[in-house]
Amino acid sequence: MAAPRRTAIRGSVARGEPAKAKSVRNAPLGPVEVVKDPAAPRSVIDFGLQRHNALHTLFNGGALSSDFCDADTYLLRAAKHHGEETGTACPACRADGLVHVTYVYGDQLGPYSGRIRGADDLPGMSHKFGEFKVYVVEVCQRCHWNFLTTTFVLGDGVPRRALPTPRDLLD
């Protein structure tokens, strides 16, 4: 009996392609960006004019309150447990208790990208990471108003590899 014929294609890897992609760990890092003060925000985008326009539309009958006061339940929970008081009233319902929730995103943060951080944590992080983006969202828990107020970049400009994922980190 003849031996079974072996094929050049096994599994999902096609002929001529390497079995494993090149490791990202061996890839060269990007160039160093010169940053005078890592804790000073750069590339700041303020959404104040859009916020003003949204409030004008809300109060002048151009939209329903449900169009702007539609915070996700996860955002409301984040505001309840991690929000930082602004000391101002909600622009939609005029109630006290408007809070800021600050999110950080970046490739160098690894599995910690997309987490909520306090404003007092940001200066320390800016010296530990080369670059990460910060998003500040204002949230009212009473009427569910939410609006992205500011985005900016922090970091010391030195590219680093992403933090490894700990074994005990749950997905």
Image (cartoon, grey):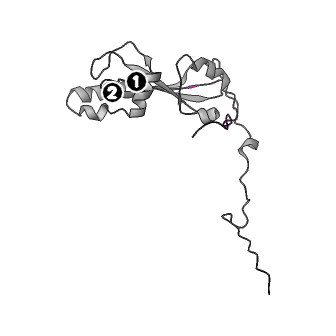
Image quadrant where residue 61 sits = top left
Residue 130: x, y in percent?
Answer: 66, 28
Residue 83: x, y in percent?
Answer: 45, 21
Residue 25: x, y in percent?
Answer: 74, 42
Query: Which of pointers 2 and 1 lies earlier in the amino acid sequence?
Result: 1
Q: Name the residue under label 2.
A: 145
Q: How far apart are marks 2 and 1 (CA)?
A: 8 Å
For image coordinates 32% across by 24% down, the residue present is 52
Residue 54: x, y in percent?
Answer: 30, 29
Image quadrant where residue 157 sits = top right
Q: Nearer the viewer, residue 109 or 44?
A: 109
Circle 2 Cα neighbour tier, 10 Å, few/some/many (<14 / 14–19 / ≥20): many
| Amino acid tagged 2 | Trp
Q: Which of 84 and 149 is in front in this view?
A: 84
Q: Give the range drawn in magenta.
A: 153-167
Q: Are circles 2 and 1 on residues that touch, CB within 8 Å?
A: yes
Name the magenta segment's main secondary structure: loop
**Which residue extends farthest bottom?**
1
Quarter of the picture containing the C terminus is top right
Q: Nearer the viewer, residue 113 or 35?
A: 113
Q: Is residue 128 above or below residue 73?
A: above
Q: Is residue 81 above or below residue 169?
A: above
Q: Mark 1 points at which residue?
A: 138
For image coordinates 57% across by 33% down, the residue present is 113
